[in-house]
Amino acid sequence: MRFESLKQPLAPPGVFARRMARSLAVAIGLIGLSLIVGMVGYHRLAELSWIDAFVNAAMILGGMGPVAELKNDPSKVFAGVYALYSGLFLILVAGLVLAPALHRLLHRLHIDSQDEGAQS
């Protein structure tokens, strides 16, 4: 994803909308992949049913915490690692989704400050 530099004009709304859509699509794909990894881990290691594995993985990924009680050590280690990953993943996805909007805002503010400097 390439953004315009400071010397270039602000991208048209259509370009911005495509950037946001691309960021959201990548974020949704990464969330789906992370959810699948969590489900497989809970299903295999904690021996949860697929629906219980989905609920546990979704709750951890969403920052809420586990639902099912984990009965063996490998499942507890997986849950801990998955929880740490999920916390960092939340920051990554937020940055990915917000990057085009923040870039546009900062670019617009820079253009506005240049216009004010030219008028004085």
Image (cartoon, rainbow, N blue to C red):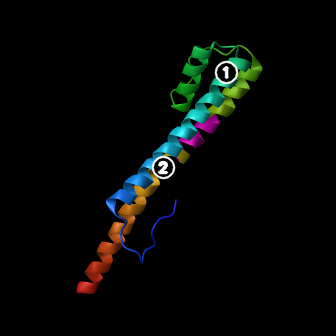
Q: Is residue 19 above or below residue 68?
A: below
Compared across the picture, whether 16 is left or right of 46 comes to left
Q: Main secondary structure of the magenta part?
A: helix
- Distance (Cα) linking label 2 and label 1: 28 Å
Give how far across and how far down residue 83 sits, in percent: 62, 32
The residue tagged 2 is 23
Give how far across and how far down residue 40 sits, in percent: 68, 24
Q: Amino acid at mark 2?
A: Ser
Q: Nearer the viewer, mark 2 or mark 1?
A: 2
Give how far across and how far down residue 49 sits, in percent: 63, 12
Compared across the picture, whether 81 is left or right of 61 comes to right
Compared across the picture, whether 106 is left or right of 74 comes to left
Which stretch is magenta? 84-91
Q: Choose top left, top right, bottom left or bottom right for residue 80.
A: top right
- Mark 2 touches mark 1? (CB < 8 Å): no
Element type at marker 1?
A: helix
Q: Nearer the viewer, residue 6 or 15?
A: 15
Disc with the residue nearer the chain's start (2 vs 1): 2
Q: Is residue 73 above or below residue 103?
A: above
Q: Amino acid at mark 1?
A: Tyr
Give how far across and how far down residue 71 sits, in percent: 71, 13
Element type at marker 2?
A: helix
Q: Choose top left, top right, bottom left or bottom right for residue 102.
A: bottom left
The residue tagged 1 is 42
Q: Is residue 80 above or below residue 116?
A: above
Q: Choose top left, top right, bottom left or bottom right for residue 120.
A: bottom left
The dot on residue 64 is none
